[in-house]
Amino acid sequence: DQQVKQNSPSLSVQEGRISILNCDYTNSMFDYFLWYKKYPAEGPTFLISISSIKDKNEDGRFTVFLNKSAKHLSLHIVPSQPGDSAVYFCAARVDRGSTLGRLYFGRGTQLTVWP
Amino acid sequence: KAGVTQTPRYLIKTRGQQVTLSCSPISGHRSVSWYQQTPGQGLQFLFEYFSETQRNKGNFPGRFSGRQFSNSRSEMNVSTLELGDSALYLCASSLGKGSYEQYFGPGTRLTVT
């Protein structure tokens, strides 16, 4: 049962434009969300996160938006650069109970930024 | 500060054999989680250890097991390997308490023939 879903397996964006990666979730108990970036032959790298008590978090070119009523979050990258080309994973966690410490991941979206 | 290290990086085993993978977390991190990544799938959670105790377990058969040592280093063992166990195995560490971000190692690529 995929509790975190990334419905777009790929996204192609021109350099300098905005990249928007989307993520949906089904478990209303999730209270923390994270985005990871992964290059081939490397482990995922933590990018940015957001608590469920917020609806926006910014870090440089990266902004994550959370819409709890829609169970949807998105990652905006502005401006996009060729070095951003990677697989992006959305992840979520429940911060209490038996699943404390476990991250639930989506299947990833391959972002390609072309010149 | 050194990152998460995993050994070996690559491994080729034959069906029916067993394998042990090792993970050294970031210094000071007490939680270690293991994930399996296969083509087309996201990261599938295997288990998480905190202070030498298994705190969480995913939906994998009993052939997959792990442990954590007093220095927080962790090992994962897979017995009676099957072809479907071929995957990238990723280890992640975090502070464990009050910390939400997990930091990943480069992974061990296991190929079962």
Image: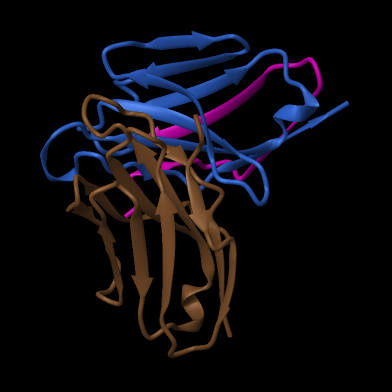
Chain colours: A blue, B brown
Left or right, B100 with reference to B21: left
Q: Where is residue A89 in the image (x, y as percent from the top left)?
A: 51, 39
The image quarter containing residue A84 is top right
Give the position of the C terminus of chain B as an image quadrant: bottom right
Is residue B9 covered in magenta?
Answer: no
Counting every numbered tag in the picture gives: 0
Range of residues picked out in magenta: A1-24
Q: Which residue is drawn at 53% across and 87% down?
A: B14
The extreme right residue here reads A115
Is residue A20 covered in magenta?
Answer: yes
Q: Is residue B92 visible?
A: yes
Q: In this view, does B77 lie above or below A36?
A: below
The extreme left residue here reads A97
Q: In this view, does A96 lie above or below B21?
A: above
Q: Where is residue A60 in the image (x, y as percent from the top left)?
A: 59, 9
Q: Which residue is drawn at 35% across and 71% down?
A: B77
The extreme bottom residue here reads B16
Q: Position of residue A71 (x, y in %)?
A: 34, 28
